[in-house]
């Protein structure tokens, strides 16, 4: 059975794409056949895996407009067991076209349901509470929530949790929070520690044991089109994502 996880936070710059790419990479490395769906119009997950966007025959835009099947656009990556459904900036226009379309909330779910044979599907959602994000939440079994260890971290999360509640009620009763992942944690500052405690208070029992540190290698890896586990597998960032991925697999059980 395929486990679908949406990596979501409507706030930008919290390490959402970094988390999606690196968790997908480590799942693949553990022998799980993994599909990473780039569902963010910025297309950063595609660039982060070194994909040349000019050369693509199909993207998530085609899938959501139903001119192509998801299987038609999936491409293998340079990493064993890891496949990508790429996106480009055209996905932003798709959202406008989708606004009045039939089944506009379930297009991603339908596409994934008709694409068997993956152990994990990881969705890199856009940094907004948009129609695309809602598609991601309806398609997913779990939400993974990266939260930056900074002062405004918890602001705006209420809105996302409210949306999740509504989706659970109406469209996807099994949607569950697999975990909250503190990112960009700077062990040297009191603030990081305070925010971490605050996050644990807000989400009892849901916070991952591993936190993602601020790490220069982690920041550099996407510009080389590589997951951090390939760019520098001994870096703090790589070790942290490897540990988080193990936790993800345990939580899915």
Image (cartoon, rainbow, N blue to C red):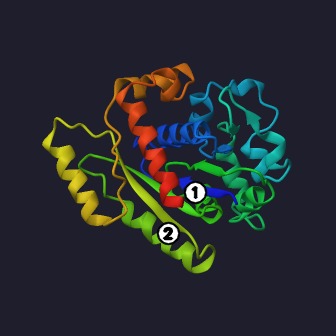
> Is residue 107 positioned above or below 227 on the image?
below
Closer-to-camera residue (67/213): 213
* Residue at the (37%, 66%) spot, across then down: 158
Mark 2: few, some, or many residues within 10 Å (few <14, many ≥20)? some
- Residue located farthest toward the left when viewing the structure as drawn: 190
Q: Answer yes or no: do the residues labelled 1 and 2 have beta carbons within 8 Å?
A: yes
Secondary structure under tag 1 reads helix
Mark 1–mark 2 distance (CA, rounded to whole Å)? 10 Å
* Residue at the (33%, 51%) spot, across then down: 209
**Residue 144 picture location, percent across and down:** 48, 55
Count of numbered badges drawn on the protein: 2
* Residue at the (16%, 35%) spot, across then down: 188
Closer-to-camera residue (203/251): 251
Q: Please tell me in which quadrant of the rendered image residue 45 appears.
A: top right
Task: Name the residue beneath numbered marker 1.
Answer: 133
Q: Is residue 8 visible?
A: no
**Residue 83 picture location, percent across and down:** 70, 38
Q: Is residue 17 visible?
A: yes
């Amino acid at each position: 059975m395929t486990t679908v996880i949406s990596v979501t936070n409507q706030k930008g710059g919290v390490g959402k794409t970094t988390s999606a790419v690196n968790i997908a990479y480590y799942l693949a490395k553990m022998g799980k056949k993994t599909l990473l769906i780039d569902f963010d119009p910025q297309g950063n997950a595609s660039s982060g895996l070194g994909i040349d966007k000019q050369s693509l025959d199909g993207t998530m835009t085609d899938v959501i407009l139903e001119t192509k099947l998801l299987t038609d656009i999936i491409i293998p990556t340079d990493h064993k067991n890891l496949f990508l459904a790429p996106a480009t900036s055209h996905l932003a226009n798709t959202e406008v076209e989708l606004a009045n379309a039939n089944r506009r909330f379930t297009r991603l779910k339908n596409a994934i349901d008709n694409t068997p044979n993956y152990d994990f599907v990881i969705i890199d959602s856009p940094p907004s509470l948009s129609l695309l994000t809602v598609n991601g939440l309806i398609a997913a079994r779990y939400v993974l929530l990266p939260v930056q260890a900074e002062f405004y971290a918890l602001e705006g999360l209420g809105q996302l949790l409210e949306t999740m509640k509504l989706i659970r009620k109406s469209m996807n009763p099994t949607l569950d929070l697999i975990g909250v992942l503190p990112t960009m944690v700077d062990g040297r500052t009191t603030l990081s520690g305070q925010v971490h405690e605050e996050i644990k208070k807000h989400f009892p029992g849901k916070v991952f044991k591993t936190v993602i540190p601020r790490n220069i290698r982690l920041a550099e890896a996407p510009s080389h089109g590589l997951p951090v586990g390939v760019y520098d597998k001994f870096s703090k960032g790589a070790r942290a994502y490897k540990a988080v991925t193990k936790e993800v697999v345990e939580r899915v059980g």
